Image (tube, rainbow, N blue to C red):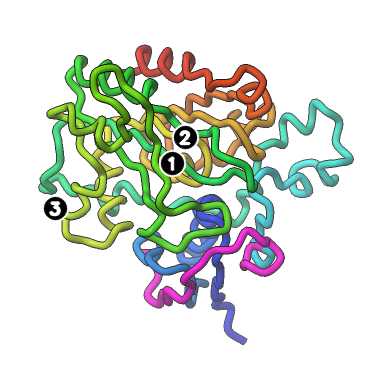
Amino acid sequence: MSNLKTIDIHPEFGYEMACSIPYAYYLHKKGELEKCIVPKGMKPFYYFCDDVEERYTERSVNNQINGVQNLPNKWIHHNTQPHFGKKYSELTEEDQIKANGWLDYSEWTAPPLKEHYYDVDLDLPDNFIVVQNSYNLEHGEKPVQYFDIKCLYEIFNYLTEKGYSIIYKRPKNTEFPTDQNEWQGQDISSEVDGFGKMTDFQLCEHYSNVYKFDDIIINIGKSYNESQLKIFSRAEGFITRGGGSSILCSYFGKPVIIYVCCSGDVRPGYFDENSYFNQLSDATIYPVVDLRADILKRGHQDYSKVLQHMKEIF
């Protein structure tokens, strides 16, 4: 009987980055991977597999039907049985903190995405930081986990004055299969003195060395995800909001500042040594937790620690 296995999956992007791709690469290294059936556009992440079928045009947040249920790690936020021999609910508060973000790594190996996609000859800006943003529903609620215009203005000013270029990424959610929390056609905008209402993309145009991600993609001329992997492999660091995008940034061995407001990654201990964020590469992770409830109570986001980390690192 053949030991070869097929991975068939279409969950949220973060689950695929943290739970599916490392399992697939583990199977590949063992010589036990036969095929991967994945969402449209994801083939570049499974470059090591000879048979990749991009079947799914949508992702599902239902982990009972999206393929996660067939993986060694069925839940992205912890896997307590291998480490504690107990369910999460049976752990002490101290052990729950230890368990947060800690997966079972016995069948889990992160693929070397940077080594595979690094291209020194690719025409990219010099010495650039990727600033990654998004504006999506958050468990059915309006978004708070994003960088607003004022914050972007401070980030752009500081980094460009320090001699960095910036590649600014905010997907329009037309580039790839989406799940139920992703919007299309929404803008981040604000009134700016002397300019009127301005979007984040318009803000980029006021800087000679801030480049829009989509424009770089067009110049590269490859698929969205292949181009993304090539770009990220050359970055000097990342400033990103939480979620699947922050997991992707953690594959490339460079500093990652992550602004998190909701979901399981706000739990104490989530980014500690055992977290999958710290197992994906030798990247240094700088989490900034700004709880959604606190944002709603005070009426605005607190980006001060994001900016503090930025000034300490870059």
Q: Nearer the viewer, residue 120 or 125?
A: 125
Disc 2 crowd, CA 10 A, few/some/many (<14, 14-19, 20+): many
Q: Is residue 19 visible?
A: no
Residue 23, compared with residue 77, is above or below; it is: below
207 inside magenta stretch: no
Q: Earlier in the sequence, mark 1 or mark 3?
A: 1
Q: How many marks?
A: 3
**Are dots 1 and 3 in contact, CB under 8 Å?**
no
| Left or right relative to 47: residue 28 | right
Residue 88, compared with residue 173, is above or below; it is: above
Give, as a single range, the part of the protein colored magenta.
47-68
Disc 3 crowd, CA 10 A, few/some/many (<14, 14-19, 20+): few
Image spot of residue 178 (x, y percent): 48, 60
Residue located beneath label 2 in the image: 241
Image spot of residue 145 (x, y percent): 52, 34
Amino acid type of the residue tagged 2 in the rendering: Arg
Gap in angstroms between the C-alphas marked 1 and 3? 22 Å
Amino acid type of the residue tagged 1 in the rendering: Ser
**In the image, farthest residue toward the bottom:** 1
Gap in angstroms between the C-alphas marked 2 and 1? 7 Å
**Residue at 27% of width from left, 23% of height from top?**
156
Residue located beneath label 3 in the image: 219
Q: Quadrant of residue 2?
A: bottom right
Residue located beneath label 1 in the image: 134
Q: Secondary structure at mark 1?
A: loop
